[in-house]
Image: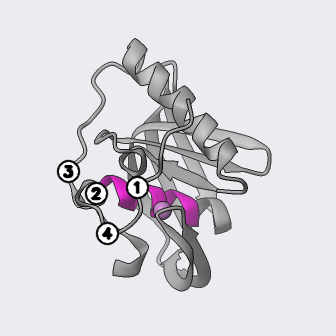
Amino acid sequence: MVLPILIYPNDILRGKNKKIKDPQSSETKELILDMLETMEASGNALGLAAPQVGASVRLCIIKLDGKTHILINPKISARSWKKEISEEGCLSFPGKFIPIKRHQKVTVKALGKNGEEIILRAEGLLARALQHEIDHLDGILFIDR
Ligand code: CO
């Protein structure tokens, strides 16, 4: 089911998001499917975080280079010292693109959709998308950066 995307300002975008205790629950599985459909419907979105569809849990999805990353309870465990600036958009800010400084590389630990542990070493656009989406899970929006 395609879910409505919350547009800024909205309290849920600034709220706390809970850790997912059971990645395999039917509730989580349904949310993942709905978020995938919602991203599909939104066109060329790179990423979507659960709070953007009104679900206050720590889950985000990134689609890049034909790969779909489903990340449950993601955490940045390492960041490069080097940063770079590039323009970013966000589905919760239609039409808004602003240059944002981000770490050039990050390492992210998370659980996958089957509850498996994932370690993602990313750079460039994927590293940027990870930082943007994980920020959402902490109620941080790109306009804050
Ligand atoms: Co966003």
Mark 4 residue's CB less than 8 Å from ligand 1: no
The tag on residue 9 is 4
The tag on residue 24 is none
Q: Dot 1, how many residues are within 10 Å of its Cα: few (below 14), some (14-19), or many (20+)?
A: some
**Which-is-in-front pick, marks 2 and 1?**
1
Q: Provide the residue designation for mark 1.
A: 6
Residue 61 in the image: state x and y as whole percent: 54, 43
Please say if the residues under marks 2 and 1 sit with CB atoms less than 8 Å apart.
Answer: no
- State the separation of the CA atoms marked 2 and 3: 7 Å
> Magenta region's main secondary structure?
helix
Residue 74 in view of the camera: yes
- State the separation of the CA atoms marked 3 and 4: 15 Å
- Colour scheme shown: one colour
At mark 1, the secondary structure is loop
Q: Earlier in the sequence, mark 3 or mark 1?
A: 1
Look at label 2 and name its amino acid: Asp
Look at label 1 and name its amino acid: Leu
Q: Provide the residue designation for mark 2.
A: 138
Magenta range: 128-137
**Which-is-in-front pick, marks 3 and 1?**
1
Q: Nearer the viewer, residue 107 or 93?
A: 93
Residue 3 in the image: state x and y as whole percent: 49, 39
At mark 3, the secondary structure is loop
Q: Nearer the viewer, residue 21 or 16?
A: 16
**In this image, 37 relative to 3: left or right?**
right
Q: Provide the residue designation for mark 3.
A: 16
Q: Earlier in the sequence, mark 2 or mark 3?
A: 3
Point 31% across, 39% down: residue: 57
Residue 115 in view of the camera: no
Point 23% across, 59% down: residue: 11
